[in-house]
Image (tube, rainbow, N blue to C red):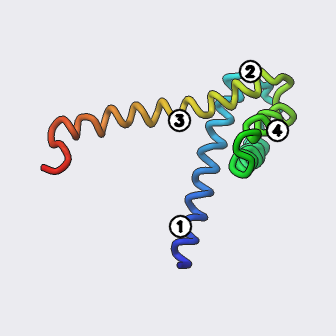
Amino acid sequence: MAALIMLMGISFIIGWIIGSIFLLLGLKLAGTPEEKLGFGSVMITALLASLVESFIPIIGCIIAWYIIKIRHTDSWGKAILAWLISIIIPAIIIGTLYFIWIIPTYAVAPPGY
């Protein structure tokens, strides 16, 4: 049981760091000024936004956009754009890896053979 809890904690921390990196990339691509892009600050923003989105499902996105807006940008548009970029880039990476590794595997040997 302790090993499972430790694994969950490690998974959370790794996911949090990766999410922070993608949010930082999204903020840079959205045109946020450099003085508002400290990695520690972005990590806190990513943590707050993910907690809000987890516990308040529907309105949580709007609150997450507001958190990004007040901490890093000066407009709603940049905050929403940074949030979208931080979701789209990992989706593109996962989709690309899927088509590179998984699809060719099924073409050679379908499951069950």
Disc ID at residue 67: 4
Residue 42 pos. (x, y %): 75, 41
Give whichever of discs 4 and 2 has the lower sequence position.
Answer: 2
Residue 38 pos. (x, y %): 77, 39
Contact between marks 2 and 1 (CB within 8 A): the answer is no
Please, what is the three-letter code of the amino acid marked with disc 4?
A: Ile
Count all numbered tags in the image, as a single digit: 4
The residue labelled by disc 2 is 31
Give whichever of discs 1 and 4 has the lower sequence position.
Answer: 1
Mark 1 crowdedness (10 Å alpha carbons): few <14, some 14-19, many ≥20: few
Q: Secondary structure at mark 4?
A: helix
Give whichever of discs 1 and 3 has the lower sequence position.
Answer: 1
Give whichever of discs 4 and 3 has the lower sequence position.
Answer: 4
Q: Secondary structure at mark 1?
A: helix
Give whichever of discs 2 and 1 has the lower sequence position.
Answer: 1
Please, what is the three-letter code of the amino acid marked with disc 1?
A: Leu
Disc ID at residue 90: 3
Q: Residue at x 50, y 33 (%)?
A: 91
- Would residue 113 appear left or right of 53 to someone viewing this image? left
